[in-house]
Image (cartoon, grey):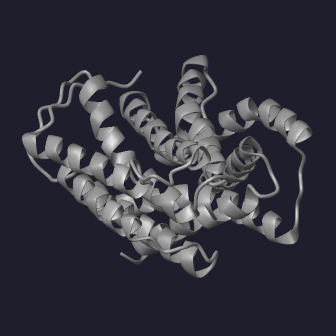
Amino acid sequence: MRRLFLLAFIWGWSFLFIKVAVEGLTPTTVAWARITLGALVLHLVLRSRGLRVPTDPVMLRHFATVTLFGNIIPFSLLAFGEQHITSALTAVLNASTPLFTALFAAIALRERLRPGQIAGLVVGVVGVAVAAGFGVADLHGSSLAGSLAAIAAGAGYGVAFVYMRRHLVGIPPVVAAAGQLSVGAVLLFPVAAVTSALGGVALTPTRVLAIVLLGTMGTGLAYVLSYRVIADLGATTASLVTYIIPVVAVVVGIVVLGEQFEWRLVLGGALTITGIAAVNRPGRVRTPAASHVE
């Protein structure tokens, strides 16, 4: 369980690192830097274990698809979102990822949702809306865009998780992670270079430290640690990290960054977590045998 809490601690702090880094880098540059640093960490792990990333055209296509929806788009959206909303709100909204995963799995993999899971999805969506402040009079255009970006990042993760379950379950997870991050670093580099040239780069020691920690700890080490947690505790127990991350991020945002405490974050977060718990509740779910590996 110590690894579980350590993982939640690392991912919870990642939202602070993003907030600090994006003050001096464009969102796509923040995304590229964390992807590249994470890939370097994972390749060191692969080298120590005598593993390698497959480079055949089929696997490269799978890696490209996963990194697009699981790294490039969501990492960029989270950094963009944190230019307009707090790191605490970003973390709570991004906690919607399991809701999107369940929804997309039901659509793409034809996994039947039980009535309780459907109710959980509804409660979770309401929680996201409450946390974001949808319907609140002071929700301006910029904060609305930031909130939608954080939610869209969760949707991107959902697509990536479902795709991985269909196409990448046949290789070690750490190999798949190294593959997707490596391809992501290559694909995103031209975009990051152009946006940096246009938007400028303003680095300080604090911002450099934030991006280094975000890439090495929040991306590379966290990937390795998450697989260890799943192997040691099982997927169901490991999913508890989803409930802890927003709590860590909210506390860190308020204490370290001085972000304003808002009760709607607590209420919205509680509703979202309740919805996630209902969606992840064990039960008999009929799944097709079509979830094969290509």
Out of 200 and 163, give the one closest to the viewer. 200
Along the horizontal axis of the image, is 280 left or right of 45? left
Image vertical order of residue 106 relative to residue 236, above or below: above
Residue at point 72%, 30% (across, down)? 187
Q: In the image, 123: left or right of 39?
A: left
Seen at 53% across and 33% down, the residue is 69
- Left or right for 187, reference 263: right
Looking at the picture, tell me which residue is in the foreground, 120 or 142.
142
State how many labels appear: 0
Please, is residue 61 above or below residue 1 in the view?
A: above
Which residue is at 53% across, 25% downward?
Answer: 62
Above or below, 92 relative to 120? below
Name the residue at the top extreme: 57
Asked which quadrant contains residue 77, the reply is top right
Residue 119 visible in the shown view: yes
User: x%, y% of residue 148?
Assistant: 50, 42
Q: Position of residue 218 (x, y in %)?
A: 60, 61
Quadrant into which the C terminus falls: top left
Question: In the rendered image, is residue 179 in sight?
Answer: no
User: Measured from the top left, where is residue 242 in percent x and y?
Assistant: 37, 60
Q: Position of residue 170 (x, y in %)?
A: 41, 34
Check the image and name the residue furthest to the front.
Answer: 137
- The quarter in which the N terminus is drawn is bottom left
